Amino acid sequence: MRIRTGVCAVAAVIGMAGCGMMRDDTADAPGPVASARTAPAGTAQTPLEAVTRPLPGESSLGSSVASLGDPTRGGFWVRTALVTAPVKGRVVNRQSGASVQVDLLPMTKAADGAQMSLAAMRLLTPSLTDLPDVMLFSS
């Protein structure tokens, strides 16, 4: 009886010691509250937030709703009232996060929204009939 009691006691001690080494992986899993609470200040919390922030060397110009511009004019460009002279830049679809480098061209007449080249529109939207909400950045 003594040996059986001793074996049970040793098994219990080893089992209890092992419990301290077990890890609950769900405790470290980021949730909506945990990720917002633990993310360092100034860092993006989602992939979409990451692409809608200026890259090093870029300036945020603002957002606009883009429509298809002149389909006969090739290249990657966006006409917008947010620039007064041609500059290099980037346009980001705020819904999908798709991004493309473009030439930013000033609008010749005051207008709401922006006009985008066919090539840029194809890369940013699943449908050419979409009117995407875009962010514009100058380089």
Image (cartoon, rainbow, N blue to C red):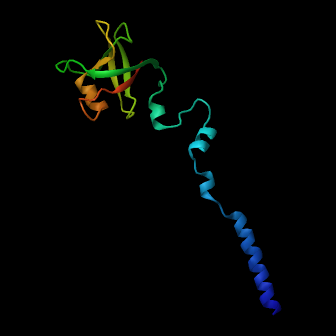
Quadrant of the image containing the C terminus: top left
Q: Quadrant of residue 106?
A: top left
Q: Nearer the viewer, residue 105 or 126?
A: 126
Numbered marks: total: 0
For residue 105, side relative to residue 57 (left or right): left
Percent x, y of residue 88 = 36, 17
Q: Quadrant of residue 62?
A: top left
For residue 37, side relative to residue 112 (left or right): right
Percent x, y of residue 113 = 33, 17
Percent x, y of residue 3 = 80, 90
Q: Residue furthest bottom?
A: 1
Q: Residue at x 19, y 21 (%)?
A: 71
Q: Residue at x 24, y 19 (%)?
A: 69
Q: Is residue 77 above or below residue 11?
A: above
For residue 34, side relative to residue 117 (left or right): right
Q: Residue at x 27, y 35 (%)?
A: 126
Q: Residue furthest left?
A: 72
Q: Is residue 133 above or below residue 112?
A: below
Q: Is residue 92 above or below residue 107?
A: below
Quadrant of the image containing the N terminus: bottom right
Q: Residue at x 33, y 14 (%)?
A: 112
Q: Quadrant of residue 127?
A: top left
Q: Is residue 85 above or below residue 33?
A: above
Q: Nearer the viewer, residue 51 or 81?
A: 81
Q: Residue furthest right?
A: 2
Q: Nearer the viewer, residue 20 or 126?
A: 126
